[in-house]
Image (cartoon, helix red, strand yellow):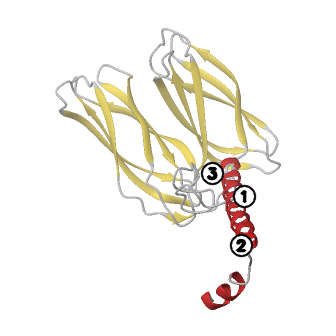
Amino acid sequence: MVFFLYNIYMPLTWRGKRQLFYYSIFAVFVFILIVGFIFYFKPAPTCFDGKQNQGEGGVDCGGPCEKGCLGQVSNPTVLWTRFFKTGDTTYDIAALIDNPNIFAGSGEFHYRLKLHDKDNILIAIRDGVTFINPQERFVIFESEVQTARRIPVSASIELDQVDWQRIEMAKPLVEAYGYKFTTHPYGIFDVTLRNGDIFPVKNIEVVVVLFDDSRNASGVSRTKIDLIEGESERKVGFSWPVAFDRIPASVEVYIRKIP
């Protein structure tokens, strides 16, 4: 190769050599300019660009993206845990859980809800079992937890290791509207559920969470619905054994299919 270039370069005149030198510099300059232009105007990677980049586990999933990748399972996340007084010695406890996995869920999932006093001493515990559907946010709820007149100041939840399974489940096409709240003599919340599917929806869990002005949960209630016919509505009522001093600032209704 060196011999070949030598034989091409040597017969050139001094003027030809100088032109070749300038042409080479110009070509390098154009190349650098083109490369710089491409990198400068190259769009920043996103979770919707159809490429595996920015530390993603797959194409537009995992890593910094909210959507998880098939075959990569993340543990459920506890978003908050709250307790609510319902009697002299009884409290409700609720925790909001997020499962980010697209096709991973569990038909049996164990947990423990705990109440602690001002000295962080455990004063009540409630074991429970529930299920986890793929890619859903749901509420774990236990009512009438006894504290033997000891006053709780904090609540926590422990989640057991999840036995993940591949689950392909369509979310029920049920929406909630027509909220109506009564504060006295007991807290009552009425809502209408509309099934937007042409097929009946069976066995769904409905949890309502009330929030105050600071977006802190101030009350939780749960019920189960056995059937909502296709393209029909059903009125549902929730109640609390205590009165509320004001209308909640906002309400969230969580609906999920019971396996």
Residue 48 sits above or below residue 235 on the image: below
Residue 34: give x, y in percent of width and height.
Answer: 72, 56
Residue type at mark 3 is: Pro
Q: How many numbered circles are shown?
A: 3
Badge 3 or badge 2: first in the primary sequence: 2
Helix, strand or loop at disc 1? Answer: helix
**Left or right of residue 142, residue 207 in this image:** right
Q: Pick the residue in front: 7 or 35.
A: 7
Residue 19 sits above or below residue 209 on the image: below
Helix, strand or loop at disc 3? Answer: loop
Residue 121 sits above or below residue 182 on the image: below
**Left or right of residue 215, residue 201 in this image:** right
Badge 3 or badge 1: first in the primary sequence: 1
User: What residue is disc 1 on?
Assistant: 30
Q: Residues within 10 Å of mark 3 (few under 14, many from 20)?
A: few
Q: How crowded is mark 2: few (under 14 residues within 10 Å), some or many (20 or more)?
A: few
Marks 3, 1: nearer the viewer: 1
Residue 10: give x, y in percent of width and height.
Answer: 68, 83
User: What residue is disc 3 on?
Assistant: 45
Residue type at mark 2 is: Trp
Helix, strand or loop at disc 2? Answer: helix
* Real-space CA distance between mark 3 and mark 1, rounded to the nearest whole angstrom: 26 Å
Marks 1, 2: nearer the viewer: 2
**Which disc, if any, is residue 254?**
none
